Image (cartoon, grey):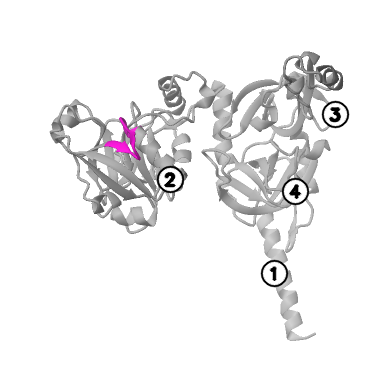
Amino acid sequence: MTSNTILRAARRTFIAGAAALLVSAVAVPSFTAPTFAADGPASVADLAQGLLGAVVNISTSQTVKGTEGPGAVPMPQLPEGSPFQDFFDDFFKNRGGDKDNGSQKVQSLGSGFVIDAEQGIVVTNNHVIADADDIEVNFSDGVTLKATLVGTDTKTDVAVLKVDPKGHKLTAVKFGDSTKMRVGDWVMAIGNPFGLGGTVTVGIVSARNRYINSGPYDDFIQTDAAINRGNSGGPLFNSAGEVIGINTAIISPSGGSIGIGFSIPSQLASGVVDQLRQFGETRRGWLGVRIQPVTDDIAESLGMATAKGALVAGVIKGGPVDNGTIQAGDVIIKFDGKDIHEMRDLPRVVAESPVGKAVDVLIVRKGVEQTVKVTLGRLEDGEKAANAEEGNTDQDKGDKAPAVSTASVLGMTVGELNDETRKKFSIAADVSGVVITDVTKDSAAAERGIQPGEVITEIAQESVATPKDVMDRIGALKEQGRKNALLMLASKTGELRFVTIRMD
C-alpha cells in the first residue's frame, strides 16, 4: 500500500468519525437521530418515521362562476341582432362560458404541519387556502378532518388553521431556530407534491437571506431538497426534527423541481404564527418612514465611509417619528441593536418588534452618528390611516404610499409650505409649492446652486403641492427612463427660474 493510499484511507476514517461525533451530540426528541457518513446522511428513515404523522395534506374547494373556472371560454360579446348569435349560443352552451350556466367547484392541494396537538393547530401557506370555501386536513393514516381558518398573513404567506383535536390523535412538531442554520447543513422536506401524499426529500441549505421579490419581508432559505407543486405549506426540517422553514416557492421553467426551492425561515414564521393564534391577525411594529437604498454616491455625499443602512426618503405624516426624532435624509444603520446592512433589512426588523416598544435607533445625520429613541406604532393602523386618507376603505390595498410631511430627493430635503416654514424662510404669502428645507453638500442639487428656502412649484411642467407629490413625480420620471428632472423654483419673493437636476 502506497503512502498516498494510506493517507486517503486515514482521511476517510477521520471524516466519518468526526461526522458521527457531531451527529451524536444532536438531541432529537422521541426519535433517533440519523447517522451521518462523510458523504451525507446514511439514512433518514428514523427521522422521517417520527415526523410523517405531523405533516398533513391540505385540500380546499372553492365555488366559482362559470367564466372564472380553469379552462373556461368566455362568451363573445356580439352586436345586438347579429346573425351569428344563435350559433354562438349553441356552441357555448354548457361549456362554462355563459354566466347563466351556474357555478363549478375548483379544488387545490397543498401541505401543512401540526404545531399544537392539544389545540389542533395546523400551519400552512396563505396561498394554499386563499379564497377557499372548504378546507380539509388529511393525515398520513387516511383520516380527514374539517378545518377552520384562524388567521392569515399575506405579507409572509402564512396561514393558521384549526381542527378538532378530539377527532383524531395528533402528532405535533415544533419550530427550531433558523438563524443557526448554515449553508451546507442537511435539511429534509416532507409534503404533498402533485397530490401524491406524504413524500420525503433530502437536501442541504443552498443559501440564506434570499430575496425573490415576493413580499416586503423576503428573507428565504434556499434549498436543493426537491420541492414541487403541492409542497407549499409543508415543513423544512433540520437534522433534529425541528421546523426551520415553511416551503413556499420554487424557481422552475417546467413547474417541477430543478433544485431551487425557497422556505420561509422559522425565525420570521413563528412570530407570525403566534400573533395569528393570539389575535387572529398580525400586529407589527411601525416606524413610519419611507426608505431607499444607500448607494455609493449617496454615501459619499453624506460623508459615510461605506454604503450601508437605509436612507430615510420621507417621514410619514402622523407616524411615530413625525416629531423630528428621525428626519428625511437620515441613514438608519442600527435598529434596536441589530445592524441594518441594506435597505430591505429595516422593514423586517421593525415588523418583528413589538408595538409600543421604545427602541434605540442609530442614525447618520449630516455625516455624524447619533442615537435616538423612538416608540413604535402599529403597521396595520398606519395602513388603515393611509387607506382612509386616499379615500379607500379596502384594507387589502394598503400598499399605496402614505402622505409624508418631509421627504429626501435628489440631495434635497423638502417639506410642506405652511405657516411655520413660511415664517422660518421668510417666504411670501403668494408663493405656493413645496419648500426646500435642506440641501446635501456635493449633491446634484447643490451643484445647481439650489438653496434652502427656495420652493419647488413644478416638476416636468406639473405642479406639486406636497412632499409626496415631489417623490411621486421624480419616481415617475425615473420609470420613464429620464436622466434629468426639470424643476421650476420660486425664490422667497416669488421670482421663478428653471433648473435641471440629473437623477442617476
Tag 3, which secondary structure?
A: loop
Say which element carries label 4: loop
Q: Nearest to the eye among marks 2 and 3: give it.
A: 2
The percent coordinates of residue 230 (x first, y second) are: 75, 37
Q: Residues within 10 Å of mark 1 (few under 14, many from 20)?
A: few
**Residue 441 in view in this figure:** no
Tell me which label, 4 or 2, sits earlier in the chain. Answer: 4
Q: Of the two numbered discs 1 and 3 on the same chain, state the one appearing first in sequence.
A: 1
Viewer-nearest residue: 202 or 50: 202
Q: Which residues are magenta?
A: 457-468
Q: CA distance from mark 2 to mark 3?
A: 56 Å
Q: Which mark is residue 478?
A: 2
Q: Is residue 410 left or right of residue 476?
A: left
The x, y position of residue 55, in whole percent, is: 74, 35
Mark sitting earlier along the chain (2/3): 3
Mark 4 to mark 3 CA distance (whole Å): 26 Å
Disc 1 target residue: 14
Q: Nearer the viewer, mark 1 or mark 3?
A: 3
Is residue 263 in view?
A: yes
Q: Is residue 385 left or right of residue 149?
A: left
Which one is earlier in the sequence, the residue at label 1 or at label 4?
1
326 and 300: which is toward the camera: 300
**Mark 1 is on which residue type?**
Phe
Q: Earlier in the sequence, mark 4 or mark 3?
A: 3
Q: Position of residue 26 (x, y in %)?
A: 66, 50
**Residue 67 lies in quadrant:** top right
Check disc 4 and give the amino acid type: Ser
Q: What residue is pinned by disc 4?
A: 257
How far apart are the alpha carbons under marks 2 and 1? 59 Å
Q: Which mark is residue 142?
A: 3
- Please identify the residue farthest to the bottom as the structure is shown: 2
